[in-house]
């Protein structure tokens, strides 16, 4: 939720136009995270006695998508676009509203006052902002927005004034350290100030943030050491902070003093280090500039000082052990992977990428000729998992549906109780957790707030925690003991498609690993592995029905509601299909277990109600036929997803879509794709923004 992007060019001359273009492109790459308003903050000349002798921070903000902001910026005639800047910091933000309606005032960056001394972009929610706001208002600060974010730049201005009055100007990094100790909730922050020209500071707690580094010189380090800072006991919330010299800083024994943290080392022959830094919510915003990134941890404060050196401090808030360095990662994603290519929308592109994405999930793990599965991230822990009391699959939204889809198979292959939980409800109930539980946390982004909180809840109670994510370096991948990276590739469309099928495949592979020593299950395992070997080709066959699915979408486009029903392995298919329809077409849609039809939902069925039934040849095929007869008897007109050649079902269908026959536990992967395409086409015909549906954003980093 919300996208942060910042760019600092240190001793790297760039025109203001180039800098603004970089900021705008960064926001466009992050627009899937929020798109109801956007803004940028950058330096402009300030007229003094008729001459431009001083710079000031300028904010340009607008309601709407990033394209609106782009047009607004480059329509302004008073911005010196051609001026070349040796060193400059620009910060930008695209918003998904949590506090305050989408408008220019509530857009980020938020500021400390009318002179823009401190400006901040923020992703997350500050839960104690009302207390801080009251504190600052009592000291003369005037608030202009409805946001929780505005307290942050004003708090930093208050801290700056307070500490400067004591005789010594604090560093920007120390100011941020003091500020975040006052904040409760989740946040990723980037701040710039005209009191600290050419400097930038960032911090995170609970929301993702990374630093990208680009230099024409040779990089001679693969990690950045961390200084650990702990605020003194006398630094209570909403009280004046301690002086800088009271800050208890303890460096790692491997460091040569605090200055050693400043070196993201580059091989410079002289003191001039030409370097560019990029701060972003996601790696997709920086891959066109650099492949070297550092993922910040919770309570990290990263700052670039006036000499162009990067420092990372960690503000200790507990006795939890954290690493003494931050690794410089090389990201593997290529720019073309986050471009639409020849497709009209990211969602359509990602639907059609599924033949390849499921193969990438299995690549290096499935040995089809030997009927063997190797999950490198789990292999050292399989014995522990086999001794567990139960398996918990905890997730939200589409990831939750992937857990529902594979629960039955996992129960069969592991012979363990499998509990599937919505992360938000799991936390609300304070669910009992045992030390011999194995808990899986499933999230495309690896940053989903409810899922992360559930992870920490289970980990604190001794459960063995496992992650399944699509994002290397994400919080879930770092905080779990082991896991599976699904390798589906970047997913830009807000409505998840290929991540669902890859999560599905990853959980199936886990079940196969758990059952490899069960003699009685070897025949079943071979059938599933054979099905996986043909999965990509079968998905390609389903995608060939695109034009037929569009024709059905044209018939359904005027409908107000849609019921999708099935049972067994395909109940999750119905839930996921209904979610896709709701997300992008804004049509009310409901996934129903067909076994529950006569317990209430049957009252909705008549000749006007749009109804889709998933009826595949599996263990509940006969029961689904009973549901079909009940629908037909009430004048229903079912659109049926069935197996190829199933003439008995096709004869009773109003419309039908045939998919290839495969092993029962994998049919849900093939059956969900027509529903993904149906949702897409209904949305396009209704002229909705498919990739950026209203009120939604990808990577839900707030509760």
Image (tube, rainbow, N blue to C red):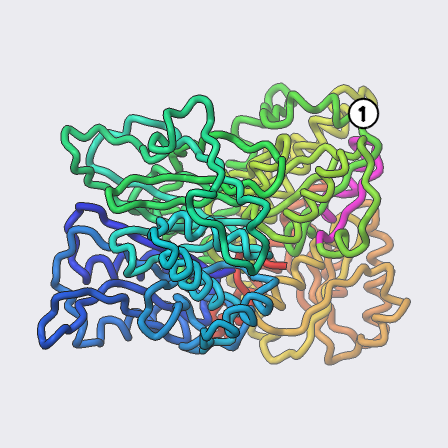
Q: Is residue 504 above or below residue 321?
A: below
The front one of 463 and 66 is 463
Measured from the top left, where is residue 192 in percent x and y? 34, 57
Identify the image quadrant of residue 633.
bottom right
Question: Where does the magenta region start and end?
Answer: 403-423
Q: Looking at the image, which residue is at 34% across and 69% down? A: 67
Find numbered disc 1 in the image and state the secondary structure of the residue it sits on. Answer: loop
The front one of 113 and 583 is 113
Measured from the top left, where is residue 208 in percent x and y? 50, 49
The residue carrying pointer 1 sits among few (fewer than 14), some (14 to 19) or many (20 or more) residues within 10 Å by Cα, namely few
Identify the image quadrant of residue 513.
top right
Identify the image quadrant of residue 22.
bottom left
Q: Is residue 368 above or below residue 159?
A: above
Measured from the top left, where is residue 216 in percent x and y? 20, 36
Quadrant where the image shows the C terminus: bottom right
Q: Quickly name the residue at label 1.
A: 387
Q: Is residue 419 above or below residue 128?
A: above
Does the magenta stretch mainly form a helix, a strand or a loop? helix
Q: Looking at the image, which residue is at 80% across and 32% down? A: 435
Residue 569 visible to the viewer = yes
Residue 357 visible to the viewer = no
The outermost residue toward the right is: 599
Q: How many marks?
A: 1
Q: Looking at the image, which residue is at 58% across and 24% down? A: 376
Q: In the displayed structure, does residue 79 sit left or right of residue 286?
A: left
């Amino acid at each position: 939720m919300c996208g942060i992007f910042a760019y600092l060019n240190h001793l790297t001359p760039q025109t203001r136009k180039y800098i603004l273009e970089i900021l705008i492109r960064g926001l466009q790459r992050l627009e899937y995270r929020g798109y109801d308003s956007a803004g940028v903050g950058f330096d402009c000349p300030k007229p003094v006695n008729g001459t431009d002798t001083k710079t000031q921070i300028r904010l340009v903000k607008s309601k709407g998508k990033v394209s609106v902001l782009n047009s607004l910026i480059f329509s302004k005639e008073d911005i010196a676009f051609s001026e070349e800047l040796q060193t400059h910091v620009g910060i930008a933000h695209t918003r998904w509203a949590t506090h305050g309606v989408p408008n220019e005032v509530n857009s980020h960056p938020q500021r400390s006052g009318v002179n823009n001394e401190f400006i901040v972009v923020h992703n997350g929610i500050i839960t104690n902002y009302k207390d801080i706001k009251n504190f600052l208002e009592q000291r003369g600060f005037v608030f202009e927005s409805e946001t929780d974010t505005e307290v942050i730049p004003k708090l930093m201005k208050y801290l700056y004034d307070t500490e400067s009055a004591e005789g010594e100007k604090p560093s920007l990094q120390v100011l941020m350290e003091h500020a975040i100790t006052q904040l409760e909730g989740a946040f990723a922050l980037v701040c710039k100030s005209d009191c600290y020209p050419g400097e930038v500071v960032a911090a995170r707690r609970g929301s993702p943030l990374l630093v990208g580094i680009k230099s024409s010189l040779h990089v001679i380090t693969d990690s950045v050491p961390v200084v650990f800072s702990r605020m003194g006991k006398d630094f209570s919330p909403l009280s004046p902070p301690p002086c800088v010299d009271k800050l208890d800083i303890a460096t790692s024994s491997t460091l040569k003093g605090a200055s050693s943290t400043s070196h993201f080392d580059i091989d410079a022959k002289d003191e001039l280090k030409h370097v560019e830094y990029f701060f972003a919510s996601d790696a997709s915003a920086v891959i066109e500039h650099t492949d070297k990134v550092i993922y910040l941890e919770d309570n990290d404060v990263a700052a670039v000082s006036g000499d162009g050196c990067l420092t990372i401090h960690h503000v200790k808030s507990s006795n939890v052990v954290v690493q003494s360095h931050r690794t410089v990662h090389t990201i593997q994603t290529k720019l073309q992977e986050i471009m639409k290519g020849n497709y009209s929308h990211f969602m359509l592109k990602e639907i059609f990428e599924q033949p390849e994405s499921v193969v990438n999930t299995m690549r290096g793990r499935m040995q089809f000729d030997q009927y063997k599965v190797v999950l490198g991230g789990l292999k050292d822990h399989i014995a522990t998992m086999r001794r567990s009391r139960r398996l918990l699959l905890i997730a939200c939204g589409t990831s939750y549906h992937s857990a529902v889809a594979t629960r039955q198979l996992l129960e069969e292959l592991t012979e363990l109780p499998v509990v599937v939980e919505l992360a938000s409800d799991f936390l609300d109930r304070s669910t009992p957790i045992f030390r011999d539980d194995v808990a899986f946390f499933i999230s495309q982004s690896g940053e989903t707030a409810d899922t992360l909180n559930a992870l920490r809840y289970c980990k604190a109670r001794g459960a063995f925690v496992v992650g399944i994510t699509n994002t290397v370096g994400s919080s879930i991948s770092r905080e779990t003991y082991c896991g599976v990276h699904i390798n589906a590739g970047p997913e830009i469309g807000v409505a998840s498609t290929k991540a669902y099928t890859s999560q599905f495949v990853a959980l199936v592979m886990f079940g196969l690993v758990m059952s490899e020593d069960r003699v009685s299950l070897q025949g079943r395992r071979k059938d599933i592995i054979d099905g996986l070997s043909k999965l990509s080709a079968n998905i390609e066959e389903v995608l060939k029905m695109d034009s037929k699915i569009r024709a059905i979408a044209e018939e359904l486009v005027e409908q107000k509601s849609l019921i999708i029903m099935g049972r067994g392995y395909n109940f999750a298919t119905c839930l996921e299909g209904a979610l896709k329809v709701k997300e992008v077409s804004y049509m009310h849609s409901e996934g129903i277990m067909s076994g529950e039809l006569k317990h209430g939902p049957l009252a909705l069925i008549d000749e006007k109600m749009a109804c889709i039934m998933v009826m595949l040849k599996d263990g509940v095929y006969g029961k689904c036929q009973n549901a079909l007869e009940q629908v037909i008897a009430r004048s229903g007109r079912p659109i049926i997803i069935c197996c190829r050649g199933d003439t008995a079902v096709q004869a009773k269908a109003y419309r039908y879509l045939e998919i290839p026959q495969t092993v029962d536990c994998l049919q849900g992967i093939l059956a969900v794709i027509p529903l993904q395409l149906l949702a897409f086409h209904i949305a396009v015909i209704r002229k909705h923004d498919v990739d950026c549906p209203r009120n939604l954003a990808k990577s839900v980093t707030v509760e």
